[in-house]
Image (spheres, grey):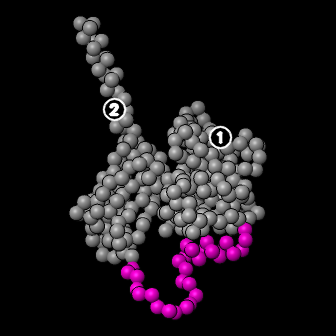
Amino acid sequence: MDKVKWAGAVLLACAMPVLVSAQTSAALRGKVLNDADDKPLAGATVAIASLNLSTTSDSLGNFLLRGVTPGRQIVQVRRLGFGFVSSVVAFAGGDTVEQDFGLVATVAKLPQVDVKAAPNLSPKLSEFEGRRKEGFGHFVTDAELTKDGNRRVSEILAKVPGITVKQGTTNAAWVATARGPKSFTAGFCPGEMDKRRGAKCGCYAKVVLDGVEVFSGISAPAGPGNVSGGQDLWDINSLHPSDILGIEIYNGPATTPAKYNSTSNTCGVVVIWTK
């Protein structure tokens, strides 16, 4: 009888890692639609590049992406003939997030005509170029990103003066300050998930993606039950250089635009514009 109980315990112990893995991973379900008429789009790729996960929408536009690591992830959706879309989605362990994505059809290029006029910049590029002309901060242009397209974003930003790129144990990387050793004796302490990826306490830069703050250094309240450490760090390698229109880097409040210069537990600001 004791042998039977012991064998049952061994089988249960062996099954536990599989059960835990199934409970902790999340999923994303939804539809990919034509933004113009809400008709389903087949053959669209839905991916989370930082996790090497991807799937394709079916004939009804439906998709299901399994095995997502809990936390804030960048979901990228693309299809031939339509503009690229990215969105920050929060995942909790064991949950299935429902979200639809609308893609905008790209306009066919007309034959070139010999007419010279002032360039019609997109709102994103207009804002980027306006601040670049003012001369405050550091800017990485689309041309530079294209030139370094075979590199990771962390490698490109490592060349910018005044910042430090902290590399994790995986491909993850985060932007921090280079203002001195004191910057890493206080500031923001990452949660358990980021710690497992190699992140340490320090003064990390605020990250703004297409006008939305994806990291602002929010810390969790102290307490005996607190193991989260607060907000998840944002992995700058979750985007490929080819998906980025431009990057703005501001080392301190003196050069940071007023719209991004809020009081927070961060050092500097990184503003990323996607295509």
Q: Position of residue 108 (x, y in %)?
A: 38, 81
Q: Position of residue 134 (x, y in %)?
A: 72, 74
Left or right placement of residue 98 versus residue 129 in this view: left
Residue wearing tag 2? 19
Front residue of this view, candidates 146 and 133: 146
Residue occupying image coordinates x 31% and y 17%:
9
Q: Secondary structure at mark 2?
A: helix
Residue wearing tag 1? 201
Q: Position of residue 175 (x, y in %)?
A: 63, 51
Report the number of numbered marks.
2
Kindly report the secondary structure that dominates the magenta region of the rendered protein: loop
Residue occupying image coordinates x 67% and y 72%:
132
Mark 1, other Cα within 10 Å: few <14 / some 14–19 / many ≥20:
some
Q: CA distance from mark 1 to mark 2?
A: 32 Å
Mark identifier at residue 89: none
From this viewpoint, is residue 198 visible? Answer: yes
Mark 2, other Cα within 10 Å: few <14 / some 14–19 / many ≥20:
few
Q: Is residue 77 depicted above or below 6 in this figure?
A: below
Q: Is residue 66 depicted above or below 62 in this figure?
A: above
Front residue of this view, candidates 13 and 227: 13
Q: Position of residue 145 (x, y in %)?
A: 56, 63
First to last magenta residue range: 107-136
Quadrant containing the N terminus in the rendered view: top left
Residue occupying image coordinates x 34% and y 55%:
98
Q: Amino acid at mark 2?
A: Leu
From this viewpoint, is residue 191 visible? Answer: no
Q: Does the magenta run of residues contain 18?
A: no
Specify the farthest residue to the bottom: 115
Q: Secondary structure at mark 1?
A: loop
Q: Is residue 148 depicted above or below 177 in this figure?
A: below
